[in-house]
């Protein structure tokens, strides 16, 4: 059994979860919308107490997008600042050094339980002014940790850019976030609309600048599959 530990990219409420495109195998979807590296570590500690956890053979860890995305959105408008600002007191965002420390703890926890660990890189964000250099730096942390611990590293960003080297990076969620609200409601109620959002918005790899469409979901799944 596989535990997929991650955020909304794993859960798949908005956009497609890459798990949908994985070969059929028993799994637990440990994706939580809006979660961060710190949150994933807390949940892993909880999962270890669950009755199903001993059945887990492999943990695929894909976390860290929100540690960059949410602080970025706070700088794009007052509403986003209010939406995410109150979280600071209870949901800590990890800078690069803290991200490495937390990921190291996640890895060592999984390995100490005798399970295989696969690190999944952070994918491309197609949002306007998104800090791609910082995203690459986080992926550099993951790749280095993978080498240090002898783990497989699924480089999703590299796979995406090989497929769509000139992907758009200028989608805007808007200062009021109304598009985001509409996305959540529509895709949650009508999952078949997900790729339609991509097509209408001219987004090659995402449904809304962040979450996977079927194309990028399949790319991510293939990168992870090669590591299993």
Image (spheres, helix red, strand yellow):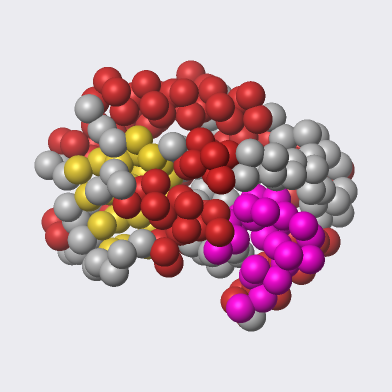
Is residue 224 within the magenta segment?
no
The percent coordinates of residue 178 (x first, y second) are 83, 61
Which residues fall within the magenta stretch? 192-214
Is residue 207 within the magenta segment?
yes
The percent coordinates of residue 132 (x first, y second) are 65, 30
- Seen in the picture, residue 154 relative to 175 is either above or below; the reply is above
The percent coordinates of residue 44 (x first, y second) are 32, 47
Q: In which quarter of the image is the N terminus?
A: bottom left
Q: Is residue 15 left or right of residue 79?
A: left
Q: Nearer the viewer, residue 29 or 162?
A: 162
Give the residue drawn at x 61%, y 25%: 134
Give the residue drawn at x 81%, y 48%: 172
The percent coordinates of residue 168 (x first, y second) are 74, 44
Q: Nearer the viewer, residue 203 or 129?
A: 203
Q: In this view, does 75 lie to the left or right of 184?
A: right
Give the residue drawn at x 25%, y 67%: 25
């Amino acid at each position: 059994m596989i535990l997929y530990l991650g955020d909304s990219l794993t859960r798949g409420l908005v956009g497609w979860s890459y798990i949908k495109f994985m070969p059929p195998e028993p799994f637990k979807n440990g994706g939580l919308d809006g979660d961060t590296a710190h949150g994933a570590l807390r949940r892993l500690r909880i999962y270890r107490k669950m009755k199903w956890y001993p059945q887990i053979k492999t943990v695929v860890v894909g976390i860290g997008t929100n540690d960059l995305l949410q602080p970025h959105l706070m700088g794009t408008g007052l509403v986003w600042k209010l939406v995410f600002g109150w979280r600071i007191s209870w949901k800590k965002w990890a800078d690069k050094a803290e991200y490495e420390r937390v990921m190291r703890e996640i890895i060592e926890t999984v390995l100490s339980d005798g399970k295989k660990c696969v690190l999944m890189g952070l994918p491309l964000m197609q949002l306007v002014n998104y800090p791609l250099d910082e995203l690459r730096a986080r992926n550099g942390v993951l790749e280095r940790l993978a080498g240090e611990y002898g783990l497989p590293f699924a480089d999703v960003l590299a796979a995406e850019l090989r497929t769509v080297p000139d992907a758009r990076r200028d989608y805007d969620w808007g200062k009021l976030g109304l598009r985001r609200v509409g996305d959540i409601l529509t895709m949650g109620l009508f999952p078949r609309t997900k790729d339609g959002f991509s097509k209408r918005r001219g987004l090659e790899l995402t449904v809304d600048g962040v979450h996977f469409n079927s194309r990028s979901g399949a790319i991510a799944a293939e990168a992870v599959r090669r590591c299993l």
